[in-house]
Every structure is written in structure tokens, then in C-alpha cells.
Image: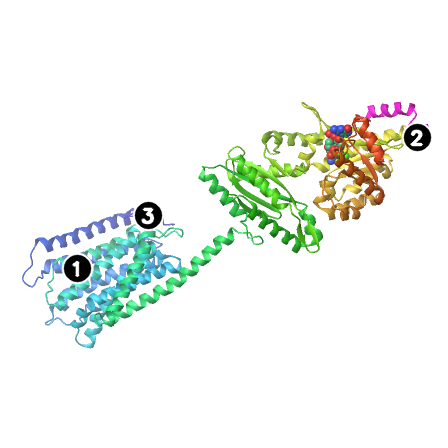
């Protein structure tokens, strides 16, 4: 049968017989002991102070009952600890000593010293001291060594004080060797009691649980009684049955009840009462110093001096340990919040700083996420050492440039974070400082690189009330900045892909992929030289059940972010290749351009899939051009090179889309297998008037010519732009001026109607 544990004060759940017994014994303990105590006050004894009834029967019974009470607990509690058994034994032995003294020793004349009763008495002190040590040990737990030493310091100092005050009288008492040994044993045990009690209590801030408290109070009363007793014996003033008797009686009762009182296991993180626990060791140390000083003058016994010296030694050891622990804790605190490479705060430190400012509430903070552009490229091409150097330089510049109340942290990789005051003026200064300090080129080995960054800003409380919300919002804004190649973007819930609307949209996009709810529009492109349609670019549209035709700008970036691109690319490819096959079969000779995303470059199956799709409808691969934006290439140049190489090996053409706004380096372009540069619309718009656009256009044409690449101008909207583009030597033009993107059948009609009019090549 499983025995439930003993629950608390005089409670033995599930064992009513034992519980009743415990209660009866407890009542008897109180009755006899209180009765005896009252008798001391109320019933004067005869001249020798000894009454057979009270000092004999009642006192003996009163002192054995606590032992019985403690024993019951030890027997019924299956988790009874060594401490409970030791206390039980101690109380029982003490009672045995009393009995031997009462019924044997004191009838001898003269009463010998040491007497027989001293044997059980001393044994009881051993058991009780052992029990105390066990309890003190348990209460201290796996405390810091420094705190344990506090206990030792205080215990030793208290011992030294006790010896200084009382030992001389005790020594004066002693006669022969046996009497010296036994006579010394009691006060030494009492000293042990004091040391153990104080040493055990100090680490727990002198706040013991009830059980420990009762035990220690009992021991303290015993020590007190013994000391007074010895003084009285020395002064020959001792009489039995006085108030002194009560110290032992009450001590015994406390011992008997102690195992039944609530005890708790110390919790590890409990703070050992700051006030007392720090003041008391200091006072103890000073007391020990004073005792040593007195010892030098021979004013206290040698033992007291030695105890005090030991206490001081413990103080020194404690100080050493404390300093080391403090240093470690400090270092640990700092390291846990510092980024190894740059010495800035790390992500944890950043989070805590943000929390601190959010909690302060007075000036709502803003969080800024900074992501370096093209860092990966530096790392890959110049090596990690250069990458690390670049990060250190950037970190130092940011730390120096930021306004005083902005704090910068490195969050990992090439990502930095700033906690700044959230008001417009400070924020503006912060953003400007960030952009400004990155301006000057950084020397790496033999090259100099110019670093730019995309910064996302989120301001509390508008963009988020908690640290996590703000970090996420700033992150979203940062990606927004990157995607649009802006230096800074402020968080806006409208553009957040994770707001509810966007989540719904993602869901709908998933079904759209399953249901193939996409249509392709085709925008023809024209040979600038002949005016003939030489190709068409496939541009995807989503037939949304409610919203109608959704333009790609609204879902392609989203699909890129949630990893839906590969499926969309496949759908677009299939639809447009089918359209191309129809047009080719209808006698039109043109190529097809399809846009692919950065994510497609890590899709190892893509080349084989495209080859298969083309083969299925009998379209030769040379007819297909894959457009990849310059920005997409920068993500993982090595990977891009590999995939584009595989595509080109399959016979497809490769075009760099939006050329001129990305960050591809010339060396990278030279490594890539390319056929076409498609200059970004921003350099075509107003190219007839904009000198800078003209320069870029001219340089691109030059580059294309040097590398043997076809140059395409997209977004041609006016005759002037077309004229300028033509003048600069672009090969192919595309734009609303020439034709808007058209559904497949309309394009077929468009081509058919054009076939009737003579083109430039036929007239010239
Ligand atoms: P893009 O590849 O640069 O495509 C050209 C965009 O410019 C098209 O917008 C086209 O309609 C528009 N456009 C053409 N001529 C002119 C002009 O004269 N003036 C102006 N202002 N715009 C002109 P669209 O169709 O909205 O596509 C936007 C972007 O979406 C594309 O930019 C491309 O990056 C992406 N996209 C479109 N279809 C697909 C696709 O099937 N797959 C992937 N991955 N991306 C696609
Ligand atoms: Ca394109
Ligand atoms: Ca483009």
C-alpha cells in the first residue's frame, strides 16, 4: 500500500490511528511540560530544591514525551530524513541522561563528576549537533560558496565571542583529566550549536522555515542553559528547579515538535535577504578583529583568538571568491550583450535597450533596421576577412555618427539595428547620419568599396507597441526599401505582407496557382533598325474572382517572399510557350521573353523543366529568352552563374532585366553567360531631355557592343524617346508607344495586321 506523505502539523493523511496517537502525545507533551514549568514558579521546593514528584516523575515524563513525539514522525514519515532521526535520538538520549541522573547519580554522595548520566547526555549532544548540521546543510543548499562562507565567518566570530565571554569561568571549574574532558565537552558542544545555527542561518538571510527555526531555537536554549548552569556551578549558586530549568524543558519541547512543523526546500533563486545577510557578516568580521586585538593584549582566552583569526581568514577567502564571482558575472553580462566582431550591442542587448526605452514611456522610441547592400558580394569575392573588416568599419562609423541618444547594435550578418528617439527631428538626423557615414569608400585589401544600406524605420506606438512588433515592422520596412532600391522606407501597414489582408491574399494566391487562374499578356518588342516585331514579353496577370485582373507588381513580390514563385514561373512558362507555338505555327517569326525571379535561380530542376516544356510543343530553345533582374543576380552570384549556365547550355537566351539599377559588378557580368541587356525603364523615360539617362543609355549600348550583347530599351512612351533610343544605337525597343501588352489572341491579330503593312526593312 502506498502511504501518503505526512502533510503538516500533526497531520498523517490516510492513517487516522497514527494521527490520533500523534495528537494525544503532543497534548501530553504540552500538559506535562507546561505543568512542570508552572510548578517551578508556583510550588516552592524544599531547601535542596529537589522534589521527587516534580524533578523525579514529572520532569522525566515531560522530557521523554518529546522524544516519543519526534519518534512518531520518524516512523510514519516514509521520507523521514536523517535529521529527524538524529533529533529523535538526541531527545531520547537526553531523557535517558535525566533518568540516570535522577534515579542513580544524584543519590550518590558525593555526586561524582563526571557521572554515568554524562554518557547519555553527551551522546544526546552529539546526536543533536549532527541533526543541526544536517538541517543547516540542507537549508543552505547549493548556495554560492561566498554566501556559505558568510555563515562560517559569522559562526566563527560568534564562537570567538562566546569563548571570550564564558570560557575562563568554565576552565576555572575543572579538576582531573576526566572532569576536564567532560567539563569542556558541554561548552564545546554548545559552541558548536551556536556556530552551526548562525552559520546555517546566515545564507538564508536569518529567515529559517518553522521546522529549522524550532530546532535552532531549541539548540540555542540548550546552549544558553548550559552556559548559565556552568556559571552558577562555578559561583556555587546553582539550585535545581529554577527558571534555568525552563531553558532545557522548552528546548526539549521545541525539539519534539520541530519535525512536525512545516519545512520547505530552499528555492535556488531565493534572495537571501539583502539587508541582514550583508550587514551581519560585516559586523561579525569587525567583532572578530576586535577579539584578535583583545587577544594580543591577553584579555581573552587563546581559543577565542584562534577562532577569530579563522573567521578573518574566512573573510579573506570570501572576499576573493566574491571578487571573482562579481567579475565573472559582470563579464558574462557584458559578453551576453556584445557582438564579438564589432563590440557593438548584439541582438539581445538591442532587444533589452528597446524594452528599456519602451518601458520608460516618456519618449516613444523608433527602431531602425539597417541592411547593407551587396555585402554578400564583398564577402564572396574578397573573402571573409575583408567582409569582417568591412563590418567593423561600418560598425565604428555608425557608432560615431549617430546622435547621442541613438544606440546601434549588430543583429547578425550585415544587419544592424538602431534604437532612437521616435520624434521626427531625431529620426531624420539618425537616418541622415546612417546614410552619411556610409558614404566614403572603405579600403579593403587593394580595392575600395562603397557601401550603401537599406534602412527600415518603425516608430512606436504607431507601428507597434512591443519590442517584437517594432522589430518586425522595421524589418518589413527594410525589405520594402531593399525591394524598391530606396535608401529608407518607413513602415506602412498597407505594404506589410503579414497584415491580415496580405495573409488572405497569400491564401488566394495559393488557390490561384492550383486553379491556374493566370492569364498572360504579351508585349511585342521591335527591331529599332527594321521596325519589325522581333519578340514578345510575357507578362502575367491574375484573374482574381473579385478584384479582376491583378497586375504582377501586386503579387509577384509577395509570391517571392512566401516562396510561391517556382509554381508561378512554371504556369507562366507553360501558357506563354503555348502561345508562342500558336504564333509560330501561324507563320510569325518571333521570340518569347519570360521573366524569372531570384528564387528560380536556386531551383535546380528549372532548366530541365523548361527544356521539356519547349520540347512538348516543338519550340526550339533559341526562341526563348529568360529575363532576370540585375537585383536578383546580386543575391547569390555563384548560384546565379550556375543556373544561368545550365539554361544557356540548353540553348535558351539570357537577358538582364532592369539593367542599370542593380548592383551587379562588371566582373560579375563578365562571368555570366548573357545575350541581352534590357536597360531599365527609368533610363528610357525622358531620355531625350535627361543628360544622366542619356549617359547611362550610351554606356549600356557601348557595353553591349563590347560584350556582343543585344541591347533592349523598355518603356518607350514617346516619339522623342524612340528617336533618342534609336540615335544611341539600341537594338530593340519596347513600350506603350509601340504597343501595350496584349492578350494572346489580340497579339495574333496585331501581328497579322502588321504583316499587311510594309515594315522599314522592306521599304529601305
Ligand atoms: P518588367 O519585367 O520590367 O516588365 C515590364 C513592365 O513595364 C510591365 O508591367 C509592362 O506592362 C510595363 N510597361 C511596358 N511598356 C511600358 C511603358 O511604355 N511605360 C510604362 N510605364 N510601363 C510599361 P507589368 O506587366 O505590370 O509587370 C511588372 C513586373 O512584374 C515586370 O516588370 C516583372 O518584373 C514582373 N512580372 C510580370 N510577369 C511576370 C512573370 O510571369 N514572372 C515573374 N517572375 N515576374 C513577372
Ligand atoms: Ca521583364
Ligand atoms: Ca524591366
Q: Secondary structure at mark 3?
A: loop
State left or right for residue 489 relative to residue 56.
right
Q: CA distance from mark 1 to mark 3?
A: 30 Å
- For the residue with label 2, is its CB less than 8 Å from the closest atom of ligand 1? no
The span from disc 2 to disc 1 (Cα, nearest Å) is 132 Å
Could you say which is closer to the camera, residue 555 or residue 419?
419
Tell which circle, 1 or 3, labels the residue nearer the N-terminal end.
3
Q: Quadrant of ligand 1?
A: top right
**Which label sits on residue 7?**
3
Disc 2, disc 1: CB below 8 Å? Answer: no
Instruction: Give how far across and how far down residue 572 sits, in percent.
Output: 76, 33
Q: Are marks 1 and 3 in contact (CB under 8 Å)?
A: no
Residue 60, label in figure: 1
Residue depicted at x 19% and y 72%: 171
Q: Is residue 324 above or below residue 482?
A: below
Is residue 54 on the magenta stretch? no
Question: How would you classify the magenta stretch by its main secondary structure?
Answer: helix
- Give the image location of residue 72, x and y in percent: 28, 54
Question: Where is residue 678 shown, x and y percent of the image?
Answer: 79, 37
Tell me where the magenta segment starts and ends, as one range: 743-763
Toward which corner of the image does residue 68 lie, by quadrant?
Answer: bottom left
Mark 2 vs 3: CB contact within 8 A: no
The residue shown at (84%, 43%) is 650
Amino acid at each position: 500500500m502506498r502511504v501518503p506523505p505526512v502533510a503538516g502539523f500533526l497531520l498523517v493523511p490516510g492513517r487516522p490511528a497514527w494521527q490520533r496517537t500523534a495528537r494525544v502525545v503532543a497534548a501530553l507533551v504540552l500538559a506535562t511540560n507546561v505543568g512542570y514549568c508552572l510548578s517551578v514558579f508556583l510550588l516552592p521546593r524544599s531547601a535542596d530544591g529537589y522534589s521527587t514528584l516534580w524533578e523525579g516523575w514529572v520532569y522525566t515524563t515531560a522530557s521523554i514525551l518529546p522524544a516519543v513525539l519526534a519518534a512518531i514522525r520518524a516512523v510514519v514519515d516514509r521520507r523521514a530524513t536523517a535529521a529527524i532521526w538524529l533529533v529523535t535520538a538526541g531527545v531520547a538520549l537526553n531523557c535517558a541522561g535525566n533518568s540516570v541522573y535522577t534515579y542513580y547519580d544524584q543519590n550518590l554522595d558525593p555526586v561524582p563528576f563526571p557521572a554515568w548520566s554524562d554518557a547519555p547526555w553527551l551522546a544526546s549532544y552529539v546526536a543533536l549537533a549532527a541533526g543541526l548540521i544536517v538541517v543547516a546543510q540542507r537549508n543552505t543548499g547549493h548556495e554560492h560558496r561566498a554566501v556559505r562562507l558568510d555563515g562560517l565567518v559569522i559562526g566563527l566570530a560568534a564562537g570567538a565571542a562566546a569563548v571570550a565571554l564564558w570560557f575562563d569561568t568554565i576552565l576555572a571549574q575543572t579538576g582531573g583529566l576526566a572532569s576536564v574532558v567532560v567539563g569542556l565537552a558541554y561548552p564545546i558542544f554548545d559552541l558548536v550549536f551556536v556556530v552551526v545555527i548562525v552559520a546555517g542561518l546566515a545564507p538564508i538571510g536569518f529567515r529559517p522555515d518553522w521546522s529549522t527555526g524550532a530546532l535552532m531555537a531549541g539548540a540555542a536554549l540548550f546552549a544558553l542553559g548550559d552556559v548559565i548552569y556552568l556559571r552558577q556551578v562555578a559561583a556555587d549558586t546553582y539550585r535545581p528547579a529554577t527558571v534555568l530549568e525552563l531553558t532545557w524543558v522548552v528546548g526539549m519541547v521545541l525539539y519534539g515538535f520541530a519535525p512536525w512543523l512545516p519545512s520547505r526546500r530552499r528555492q535556488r533563486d531565493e534572495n537571501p535577504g539583502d539587508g541582514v545577510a550583508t550587514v551581519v557578516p560585516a559586523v561579525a568580521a569587525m567583532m572578530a578583529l576586535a577579539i584578535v586585538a583583545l587577544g594580543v593584549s591577553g584579555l581573552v582566552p587563546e581559543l577565542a583568538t584562534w577562532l577569530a583569526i579563522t573567521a578573518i581568514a574566512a573573510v579573506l577567502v570570501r572576499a576573493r571568491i566574491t571578487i571573482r564571482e562579481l567579475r565573472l558575472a559582470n563579464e558574462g553580462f557584458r559578453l551576453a550583450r556584445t557582438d564579438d566582431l564589432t563590440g557593438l550591442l548584439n541582438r539581445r542587448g538591442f532587444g533589452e535597450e528597446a524594452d528599456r526605452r519602451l518601458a520608460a514611456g516618456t519618449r516613444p522610441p523608433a527602431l531602425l533596421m539597417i541592411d547593407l547592400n551587396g555585402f554578400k558580394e564583398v564577402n564572396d569575392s574578397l573573402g571573409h576577412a575583408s567582409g569582417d573588416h568591412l563590418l567593423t568599419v561600418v560598425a565604428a562609423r555608425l557608432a560615431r555618427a549617430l546622435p547621442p541618444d541613438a544606440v546601434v547594435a549588430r543583429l547578425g550578418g550585415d544587419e544592424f539595428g538602431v534604437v532612437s528617439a521616435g520624434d521626427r527631428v531625431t529620426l531624420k538626423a539618425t537616418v541622415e547620419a546612417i546614410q552619411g557615414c556610409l558614404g566614403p569608400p572603405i579600403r579593403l585589401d587593394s580595392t575600395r568599396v562603397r557601401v550603401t544600406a537599406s534602412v527600415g524605420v518603425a516608430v512606436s506606438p504607431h507601428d507597434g507597441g512591443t519590442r517584437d512588433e517594432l522589430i518586425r515592422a522595421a524589418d518589413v520596412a527594410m525589405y520594402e526599401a531593399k525591394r524598391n532600391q530606396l535608401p529608407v522606407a518607413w513602415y506602412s501597414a498597407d505594404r506589410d505582407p503579414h497584415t491580415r489582408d496580405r495573409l488572405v491574399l497569400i491564401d488566394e494566391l495559393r488557390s490561384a496557382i492550383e486553379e491556374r487562374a493566370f492569364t498572360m499578356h504579351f508585349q511585342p518588342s521591335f527591331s529599332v533598325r527594321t521596325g519589325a516585331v522581333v519578340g514578345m514579353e510575357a507578362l502575367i496577370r491574375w484573374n482574381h474572382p473579385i478584384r479582376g485582373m491583378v497586375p504582377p507588381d501586386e503579387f509577384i513580390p509577395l509570391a517571392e517572399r512566401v516562396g510561391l514563385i517556382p509554381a508561378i514561373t512554371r504556369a507562366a512558362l507553360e501558357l506563354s510557350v503555348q502561345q508562342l507555338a500558336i504564333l509560330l505555327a501561324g507563320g510569325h517569326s518571333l521570340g518569347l521573353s519570360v521573366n524569372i525571379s531570384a528564387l528560380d535561380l536556386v531551383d535546380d530542376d528549372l532548366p530541365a523543366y523548361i527544356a521539356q516544356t519547349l520540347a512538348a510543343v516543338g519550340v526550339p530553345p533559341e526562341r526563348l529568352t529568360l529575363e532576370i533582374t540585375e537585383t536578383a543576380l546580386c543575391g547569390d552570384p555563384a548560384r546565379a552563374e550556375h543556373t544561368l549556365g545550365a539554361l544557356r547550355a540548353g540553348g535558351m537566351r539570357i537577358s538582364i532585366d532592369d539593367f542599370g539599377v542593380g548592383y551587379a559588378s562588371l566582373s560579375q557580368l563578365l562571368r555570366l553567360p548573357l545575350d541581352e541587356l534590357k536597360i531599365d525603364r527609368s533610363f528610357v523615360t525622358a531620355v531625350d531631355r535627361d543628360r544622366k539617362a542619356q549617359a547611362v543609355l550610351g554606356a549600356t549600348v557601348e557595353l553591349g557592343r563590347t560584350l556582343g550583347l543585344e541591347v533592349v530599351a523598355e518603356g518607350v512612351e514617346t516619339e522623342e524617346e524612340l528617336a533618342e533610343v534609336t540615335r544611341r544605337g539600341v537594338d530593340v525597343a519596347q513600350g506603350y508607344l509601340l504597343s501595350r501588352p496584349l492578350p494572346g489572341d489580340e497579339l495574333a491579330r496585331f501581328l497579322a495586321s502588321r504583316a499587311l503593312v510594309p515594315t522599314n526593312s522592306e521599304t529601305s
